Image (cartoon, rainbow, N blue to C red):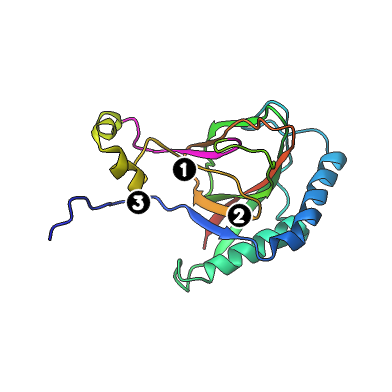
Amino acid sequence: MIEPVIPIFPTFLHQMEVENYPDTRDRLINYCYQEKKNFPESQHKSNRGNSWHSQARYMNSRNIVSTTLRSTVDRYFKSNVFQNKVSYNFCNAWININSKGASNDTHNHPGSLLSGVLWVKVPQDYEDRDGSLEFDDSHGWEEWKYLNSLNNDLKDFYHKTPAHYRSPKEGLLVIFPSHLMHRVSENKSNEDRISISFNIELA
């Protein structure tokens, strides 16, 4: 029997969880807030509204951010997703604290191959799309008319849509190709949303 649809050239979104995250959560949160207190001036990147963006320096020393990222990503790279000979290096990492009304404009990460985010703190009252990480299909413009003609169930099954979003979850780390255009939707909660972003090169 011939398959009616064959997905080709998929884009992979890698997902992994920090081991025993409840044991690390409070220490990570406290560290992030202490860094904001020590270095209150925010970097101005894609962040908008009531947000704080740290300097991208946390992989330069041993701290709870670098050890958490390294242990989690190491474990993933040792799984059967990548070839045994493949290794990686962190380019940089930074902390994001988005308070109510904060968001991140659409952007990508030139100069690296893979990028990622670890959700440290997620407001308890978040609804489905609040503070979500949203990706744009790099072929969305060229395929707009074609995509609109496809059956919705088929598009949902193969994630063949102009955009895809991932709701934040504490302790979840995702990695994606750095060229993907992405953004973070507005934090509508009175609670802060804390994440750690990073870039990776393969060796």
Earlier in the chain: of badge 3 and badge 2, it is 3
The magenta segment: 130-141
Mark 3 vs 2: CB contact within 8 A: no
Residue 89 coordinates in the image, percent (x, y): 59, 60
Q: Position of residue 18 (x, y in %)?
A: 64, 61
Q: For the residue labelled by badge 2, is the local secondary structure a helix, a strand or a loop?
A: strand
Q: Which residue is mark 3?
A: 10
Against 145, is 128 above or below?
Answer: below
Q: Which residue is mark 2?
A: 172
Whole-percent x and y of residue 184?
58, 35
Residue 126 found in image quarter? top right
Q: How far is the residue under mark 1 from the one under mark 3?
A: 14 Å
Q: Quadrant of residue 98?
A: top right
Question: What amino acid is labelled 2 in the image?
Answer: Leu
Badge 2: residue crowd in 10 Å (few <14, some 14–19, many ≥20): some
**Residue that sits furthest to the left in the current view:** 1
Residue 178 appears left or right of 66? left
Question: Is 143 on the left-hand or right-hand side of 90?
Answer: left
Q: Which residue lies at the image location 62% right of the left edge and 30% below the top edge? A: 186
Q: Secondary structure at mark 1?
A: loop
Q: Which mark is residue 179?
A: 1
Name the residue rendered at 46%, 43% in the picture.
Answer: 179
Amino acid at pointer 3: Pro
| Residue at x 69% of width, y 30% of height | 44
Which disc, if any, is residue 199?
none
